[in-house]
Amino acid sequence: MELISQISFGLFNGAVWGSVLALLSSGLNVVFGLMGTVNVAHGSFYMIGAFTSLVVFKGLGTFWPSLAISPLVVGLLAVLVGAIIRPVRGKTLVAVMITFGAMLTLQGSALIIWGSRPRRLPLPFMESFSVFGSGYSYYRLLVAAISGLVLLSLWFLLRRSSLGVLLRATRADSQLSQSIGIPVQKVNLIGFGLGGSLAGLSGSLMAPLVSLTPDMGLRIFATVFLIVILGGLGRIWRAALVAFVFAATRSLTTAFLDPTKGLILTFSIAILAILFESGTGE
Amino acid sequence: MRWSSRALKWKVIAFSVLSAYLAVLPIFAGRFQLVLFTEILIWGTYALSFDLVFGYAGLLSFGQSIFFGIGGYSILYGLKLGFGPALSLTFVFLVACIAGLVIGAAIVRAKGSRFFLITLVGSILFYILATDNSWLTGGTDGMVVPGKFLGLERYYYLVLGITLVLVGLVWLLVNSPIGLGLKLIRDNRERARLLGYSVKKFRILAFSIGAGIAGLAGGLYGYTTGFVSAGFFHWTKSADAVVWTVLGGTGTVVGPFLGAALLTFVKNTVSALTGKFYTATIGLLLIATITLFPDGITGILQRLLEKIRGSADE
Amino acid sequence: MNNWDRDRHTRRSFLKGLLGTGIGLLTGSFSLQASAASPITVGLQVELTGGLSTYGHWHLKSARAAAKKINSEGGIAGRKVKLVHEDTETDPATGSRKMRRLVLKRGADVVLGSQHSGVCLASIPVSRRFSVPYFPIGEATQITGNRGHKYVFRTNYSVEAHAQSGYSWVMENLGTNWSVIYANYAMGQSALKEWSSRLQVAGGNLVQSIAVPQGTDDFGPYLQKVDSDESDLLFIILYGPDALGCVRRAEEMGLNNELEIFGNTGSVEALGVDFPGAEGLWSVTNYPRRLEEIPDKLKSFNREFRERVGLKSDGSGPGGSIVDASHFWVPWENLHLIKMAIESSGWREKKDHPRLIKQLEGISLEGSLEHPQGEKYIRQMDHQGFHAQYIQRVEDGTLRIKKRLAPASGEYEPHSSL
């Protein structure tokens, strides 16, 4: 393929992937911003979202309802995890370990229920179009569109709605918020649920495009953490931007570089980024 | 004061009894039990490295597998270079310590959850490096560690000896002024600084020694099983150390061994809990332990002992 | 004595263990006492969890069916076959630990090995240490090469054998300009090396080799590198979910209209082929999926074999899902091979192993119910087995065998001399 078509394909493909990664990283950042907890189980929420789509597809014969069902299911699960963490909020590291335990539990449960054989969901519709000589499914466009819409809604929610104000206030200063009557505990749980729903939705959207295995959350978790770190922990919109840049870069570099070396480079950059970040304490 | 010297006396007695039992174990244990105990001792040592770094120095490190892997490959290359077992093991400890020093110096400045993330990402990074460079590591297919098979008993005594020495040394360390300094830094960083402690130096020291111990565990594991692979670096190995220590009791010297012993024993004998049920089980166990029994098994045992002693005192 | 012996093997509690080991020691040295009545314990290393669990599940069924058949026909030299298995969790360290458990705790006299090459390589030192005959299934060439030893026998093809047997057919029929997309770890790298080196020596052209890291979700960027103008063939060396993802994405991108696509062993074995993009897909396999496609003289054997194990004639299992049958015949055949070797060599107990080994070296087998995959032989020099393999193609939504490649076609230079 020609250079121009390769680059164009890379950018295009990257935009689609980037939108989903942006969704996932936003979810992670909502939780971190709120409770200062790095939710190690975030990848597992994504995985549960994907498997929920599988269940819905097998049960109802169609994929679409899962886009509404998964965020709900995973959101509730996330609230549960958030509730468990609540008593140890102050001790960050202990909270991190609990989320780690949650990750193991979720992954282990998926293993028990579905086993490790990779599952596949068929594409909800087969129509495709041509991008510089290669076929590309319309479904991928839809994924990008839905992700974009949800991100937009998230922005509105956080910036314009009263819930958003509460979330941001609690994040800024929970003690002060509590003293003026904001139900900090409840808000935190909602935040956790929101983060989880975003992950669940991402999982559902990606389900027809990837192989479903219990450890699929782990595979994507490293990437999402990277993005969140590079964008700055807790900074939702910077991370979303990084997500797009990252996905586009990866798509492009695969065409021209050895992908493993690329991975090594990215991880190293991430480590350096964390080291030199003068972040929001913790 | 009376309390602590009596507690000390009990601890020494318990330690001696346990050591004596372990020393004579090979006489009456079957081959499989011998292998099992050897493994438990190695994993306990490995978990101890995590406990030193987290329980005593307050650094949540998910990167112990980095040093476990470095240790495993150091013994491979040490033996290949012609060093005898003793020299090779020393080599392993030194290499791992130095690696810990270098890495530690770079990263201990990061706080809490950032430190955790760096070690986690670092662990994944090392795994990728190891699988990608199969000329050096054999990738996931691994490499055979050279040397004749010396017999299960000899391996057991080697591991036991090294473990007892390490446990003794670590115990001395954490009860020394250095250990107190570490604990102070862990609990109240600002106060420690005001008192003149160099937080950075203490942390690097702890991290580096922890790395050496983890490396030694890796070297021993490679040596006694005759096989090393990139899997030594996998981050789930780091996770194992965390789970064992938390289960057994953080901030104790014996906790990691209890946790490692319990889970290794369970893994090997209770087949109902192996295979597909294992992951979910330890996940739940971890959550339950942290929320309900934060001091782990040692905490439970201590409370039991207190109750007994309490009623005896009256 | 026998009572203590049994207790030693089934005991679980720690305290009982303390007590029992004392007495166990006294009797331990007698526990392997051979007697006409004592069973022959066959250990089985299988992947029941983890990435290769689809194989393990069927290997276990196959081994159990073989044991059942043998026992119902009088056992091996009049002794019952006792099958014990352990889950390797598709992890080399766990796999070798389970191997030690099979040998030391569960008393395995011989061990049928794992599908995972890493597990096999980690377990080979254990088999050497404790002198236990080991029959690994993993395909890494070194297993019967520089990492093998005289207790190791592999009846199924190595990576190199597959390549040696198949490359000239592929060059003659699909083209000499290859684009290879491969899994970037030991197995994939090894297959790339074996196939492409032969291609190049025979005057063909390796247009490009595209490395894919493990666990890739998005094949788009890798597939768009494929130079469909210069290449005749896209050669896929990927496994499990990666293979699935790649083939589907290739179809989505329309690559199947631009060049031939050929899947190496293990890549398309578990793929359902009834989707439009699969049409025309070529692959190589040890064992045809559908009973109809099996050569006539082996049909009746396979009909009965499949019935006993539970595989349907269309290659699906009880739930209707496609089974990767590429290696599931190996445990069945190996168990029968062991039976035959024990009976003809007069093996009774561990010290007779050298006799058993001698019997297995250079052995030659005909297709039969006991060896339904067909004729094969084990090379004396490196204990590597050679058998037929098949080129197949998806036509009208089903897999059809296009060519049978004879066992001897796979012979390559041995890498060790045992």
Image (cartoon, rainbow, N blue to C red):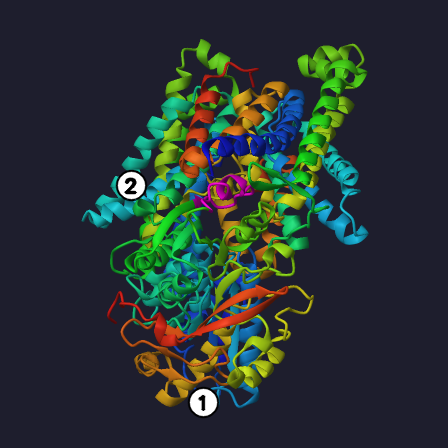
Q: Between tags 1 and 2, which lies in front?
A: 1
Residue A186: percent from left, percent from top? 78, 24
Q: Which residue is mark 2?
A: B92
Q: CA distance from mark 1 to mark 2?
A: 51 Å
Task: Give the position of the C terminus of chain A as an image quadrant.
Answer: top right
Could you say which quadrant of the image residue B253 lies in? top left
Q: Report the amino acid beneath label 2.
A: Val
Q: Tag 2: Cα neighbours inside 10 Å, few (<14), some, or many (≥20)?
A: many
Give the camera-side residue of C92 and C281. Answer: C281
Discs 1 and 2 share one subunit: no
Q: Report the amino acid beneath label 1.
A: Ala
Q: Is residue A199 magenta?
A: no
Q: Residue furthest front?
A: C229
Q: Chain of mark 2?
A: B
In this rendering, would C189 be left or right of C214? left
Residue A161: percent from left, percent from top? 79, 16
Q: Which residue is mark 1?
A: C77
Q: Secondary structure at mark 1?
A: loop
Residue in the image at 52% along x and 23% along y: A230
Give the camera-side residue of A22 and C355. Answer: A22
In this rendering, would B211 be left or right of A193? left
Look at the image and tell me whether residue B29 can be seen: no
**The magenta segment:** C211-228
